[in-house]
Image (cartoon, rainbow, N blue to C red):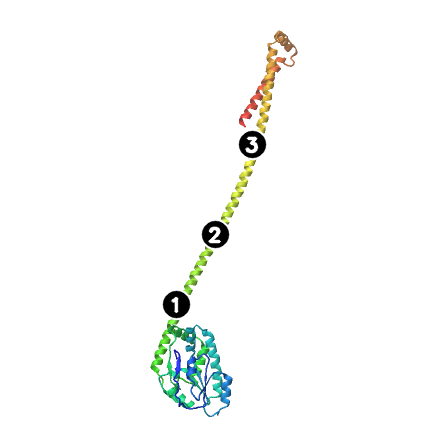
Amino acid sequence: MTTGTTAIRHLPEHSVTTDCTIFVLPDMDPAIAAALAIPGVQVSPFDAETVQATLSATDSGRTSCAIIWPYPTTLMARALADGQDPVATIRTWREAVQQVLDIYRQNRRQLVLVDALLLEAESEAGRSQLARRLGLDAQFLRARKGPAPDEVSIALAASVTLRLPDIEACLDELLSVSLSPVTDLAIALDLTALGAEYAQLKAAAQEAELLRKQVAQQQQEAARKQAAALEDLHNESEKYKAAAQEAELLRKQVTLQQQEAARKQAAALDNLHNETRKRQTAEQQRDRLARRVSDLTSKLEKVFASTSWRATKPLRKVKGLISRGPPPVDLVLIEEKRLTEDALSAGGGKSQAS
């Protein structure tokens, strides 16, 4: 697999002349297309209709067209390094490769497919075979490796490419029918370099997979912690709700107790008011009775102190003995005085009790 920009050595003025047409797939390094400008060789961007027209216009018994295709990993790594959209790049590559394979199935004798890696391989055998089929000199098909994309872009591209089954299927079919340094169609392979590059890519892919697993574990741990935090938050929310409900219940109970206390206080004030009125009435009645007793006592003392009362005392006794009737007036007055005093005493006791 190529890891950098390639450039083909320019031909001297005495280059061979051939009517072969070379088509280059999209997103190929522009330096390759520019370096393929060999006198007598027409280089064009790949277009399915143009390729079909070119094949139809030439002899079906000889090779008249070649299509050079880049490795998908190389394109994706370059797109990542240049800040381009790797998804769009790999999608364009897949669509173009599908068209290439469809054309090749119908024109196997006239068309040769070439892996761009063949132009920069150390071995000359693959380029010699390509030169013979195209009628060119193999020495002019040698490309020089340019600056390679960074290792991170290459590792990511390799990891992603290996995970795309349709890309891998297209690549396998391409390699099976193309001149490439990584297939049996290339006579001499640089296995040492290829093995080292594969090992590097494999290590990078393994490292990327390890990083992916670590990220997945970190995401799972973060998700677990987030779930635990949400659970704790839910529990705290439930506790807050329960505390709020309990506080509301206590508030209602306190309100009911306050209302009951206010009702009892109002009833007690009403009872106190009633008792106050009763006490005032009893005191007024006591005062009236006290005044009456005082009046009666004064009157009685005047009567008892009068001369007429003392002079008629013998007559009252005789009358009482003869008639056995009502008691004398003085006894009635005395009894009334006693009853009045008893009533006053009873009224005073009630007032003191209240």
Look at the image and tell me whether residue 351 can be seen: yes
SS class, disc 3: helix
Q: Report how far apart the C-alphas of labels 2 and 3 lie in the structure.
A: 46 Å
Q: Hey, what amino acid is under mark 2?
A: Tyr
**Residue 272 percent across, percent down from the top left:** 56, 32
Mark 1 burial class by Cα count in 10 Å: few <14, some 14-19, many 20+: few
Q: Report how far apart the C-alphas of labels 2 and 1 lie in the structure.
A: 38 Å
Q: Hey, what amino acid is under mark 3?
A: Leu
In this picture, is 215 found above or below 43?
Answer: above
Mark 2 vs mark 3: give the one in front: 2
Q: Who is closer to the viewer here, 69 or 290? A: 69
Q: Hey, what amino acid is under mark 1?
A: Gln
Mark 2 vs mark 1: give the one in front: 1
Mark 1 vs mark 3: give the one in front: 1
- Residue in the image at 35% along x and 80% along y: 195
> Which disc number belongs to residue 214?
1
- Residue in the image at 51% along x and 45% along y: 251
Tell me which corner region of the image, top left, top right, bottom left or bottom right, holds residue 277. top right
Q: Who is closer to the viewer here, 26 or 321? A: 26
Task: Identify the residue position indicated by label 2 in the image.
Answer: 240
- Residue in the image at 54% along x and 38% along y: 262
The mark tally for this picture is 3
Residues under numbered marks 1 and 3 in contact, where contact means CB atoms less than 8 Å apart: no
Task: Identify the residue position indicated by label 3 in the image.
Answer: 272
Lower position in the chain sequence, tag 1 or tag 3: 1
Q: Who is closer to the viewer here, 65 or 29? A: 29
Q: Who is closer to the viewer here, 254 or 26? A: 26
Mark 3 burial class by Cα count in 10 Å: few <14, some 14-19, many 20+: few
> Which disc number belongs to residue 226?
none
Lower position in the chain sequence, tag 2 or tag 3: 2
